[in-house]
Image (cartoon, rainbow, N blue to C red):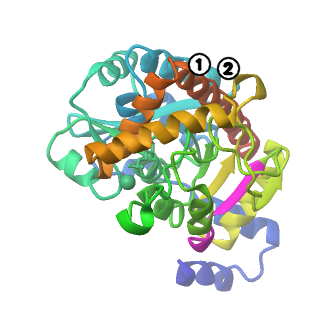
């Protein structure tokens, strides 16, 4: 990377800065024809990427493990429609029978939403699912890898994985954080859920070199609640400024992610004391039942859904929609 760039600088030393910028941006573009044979890229998505048009990637663990059927299907379709309405092409990413899908057809979404057999894959087991012909929901980490390889710069999700409460003994730190530390994609999320240890999550993000930007907020949003008592490291108030920031990050070749923390709309939030009560109950049940590893996040989400009488799911859907809107706006600004 360093060698390649300095070679360009040496060879083009007579060129203007504008020429050089254009050349570096071009270099960052993906040649889709050289992707591995197990990629299936939707035609709208590949046309958009090849013509430098806005695309927004979407994860699928939220469909397979994050929400019950049929709400998951409704959410997935609505979010895609929101992205289209805001001028970008949606690309839901998943593994279906060993094929890495970048953009899903409606019947594929339906299949994914209904199956109880899907794996939940991250960096460590993505290749396993593909090589074994499995069907899997991609986590934030796996979706970032697939998006980056396909030339997609912007990705919308609900919340990222993080450092789990009690990580000092369990060592449960989501691979989403290390992925954010090395894969340059803009991830729009509503902060981190209060089921996590949010202060430690922010510390790990900083150590990993992740740019964490609060969108129109000074505090790091806590998923179901729009504010927390933790300061957000950086703040920007428009999609245009986020796009400007990302262009400089790419020119510096930072090879780390940009996390945009977008607060849930005030009218959809659940008061902190209410949601925290459910979280504590769910966490103590989890301990009693000895649940660990990959099952932690899906278990907690499901229990909080039950304890809140479905309110947590409504808020979750509202914040994903809100993130999709902002992600489309950022993608449009980035490709303007
Ligand atoms: N947050 C949600 N719903 C989800 C997830 C996070 O509100 O479904 C999923 C995302 O796919 C995220 C994953 O990448 O959980 C993190 O899992 P883990 O904590 O096991 O790394
Ligand atoms: Mn984990």
Which residue is pictured at 65% across the width and 44% down the height? 222
Looking at the picture, does residue 189 appear above or below residue 251? above
Q: Quadrant of residue 168?
A: bottom left
Provide residue 223's location: percent of width, then percent of height: 62, 39
Looking at the picture, does residue 292 appear above or below residue 271? below
Q: Which one is in front, 76 or 41?
A: 76
Given contact means CB atoms under 8 Å apart, are the residues at marks 2 and 1 in contact? yes
Q: Is mark 2 within 8 Å of ligand 1?
A: no
Q: Which one is in front, 44 or 194?
A: 194
Asked which secondary structure carries label 1, the reply is helix
Look at mark 2 in the image and give the residue it sits on: 85
Few, some or many residues within 10 Å of mark 2 (<14, 14–19, 20+): few
Asked which secondary structure carries label 2, the reply is helix
Indicate the quadrant of ligand 1 in the picture.
Answer: top left
Provide residue 127's location: percent of width, then percent of height: 25, 53
For residue 22, side relative to residue 275 (left or right): right
Q: Which one is in front, 254 or 28?
A: 254
Which residue is pictured at 69% across the width and 28% down the height? 269
Q: Quadrant of residue 62?
A: top left
For residue 274, side relative to residue 123 (left or right): right
Look at mark 1 in the image and give the residue it sits on: 81
Provide residue 303's location: percent of width, then percent of height: 41, 30
Which residue is pictured at 64% across the width and 53% down the height? 259
For residue 249, side relative to residue 306 (left or right): right
Provide residue 228's location: percent of width, then percent of height: 72, 48
CA gap, disc 2 and disc 1: 6 Å
Few, some or many residues within 10 Å of mark 1 (<14, 14–19, 20+): some
Residue segment shown in magenta? 206-214
Looking at the picture, does residue 261 appear above or below residue 169? above
């Amino acid at each position: 990377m360093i060698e390649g760039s300095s070679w360009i600088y040496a060879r083009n030393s007579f060129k203007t800065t504008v020429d050089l910028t254009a050349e570096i941006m071009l270099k960052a573009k993906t040649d889709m024809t050289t992707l591995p044979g197990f990629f299936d890229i939707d035609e709208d998505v590949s046309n958009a990427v090849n013509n430098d048009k806005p695309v927004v990637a979407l994860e699928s663990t939220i469909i397979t493990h994050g929400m019950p059927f049929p709400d998951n299907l409704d959410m997935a379709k609505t979010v895609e429609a929101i992205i289209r309405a805001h001028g970008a092409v949606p690309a839901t990413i998943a593994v279906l029978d060993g094929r890495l899908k970048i953009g899903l057809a409606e019947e594929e979404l339906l299949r994914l939403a209904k199956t109880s057999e899907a794996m939940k894959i991250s960096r460590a087991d993505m290749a396993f699912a593909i090589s074994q012909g499995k069907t899997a929901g991609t986590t934030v980490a796996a979706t970032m890898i697939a998006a980056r390889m396909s030339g997609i710069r912007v990705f919308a999700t609900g919340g990222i994985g993080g450092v789990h409460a009690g990580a000092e003994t369990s060592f449960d730190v989501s691979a989403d954080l290390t992925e954010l530390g090395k894969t340059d994609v803009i991830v729009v999320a509503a902060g981190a859920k209060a089921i996590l240890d949010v202060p430690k999550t922010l510390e790990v993000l900083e150590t990993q070199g992740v740019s964490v930007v609060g969108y129109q907020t000074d505090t790091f949003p806590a998923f179901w609640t729009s504010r927390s008592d933790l300061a957000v490291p950086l703040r920007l108030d428009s999609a245009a400024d986020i796009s400007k920031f990302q262009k400089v990050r790419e020119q510096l070749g930072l090879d780390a992610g940009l996390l945009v923390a977008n607060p849930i709309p005030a009218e959809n939030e659940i008061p902190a004391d209410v949601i925290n009560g459910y979280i504590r109950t769910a966490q103590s049940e989890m301990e009693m039942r000895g649940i660990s590893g990959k099952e932690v996040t899906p278990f907690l989400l499901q229990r909080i859904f039950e304890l809140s009488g479905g309110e947590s799911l409504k808020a979750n859907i509202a914040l994903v929609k809100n993130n999709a809107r902002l992600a489309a706006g950022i993608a449009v600004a980035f490709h303007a």
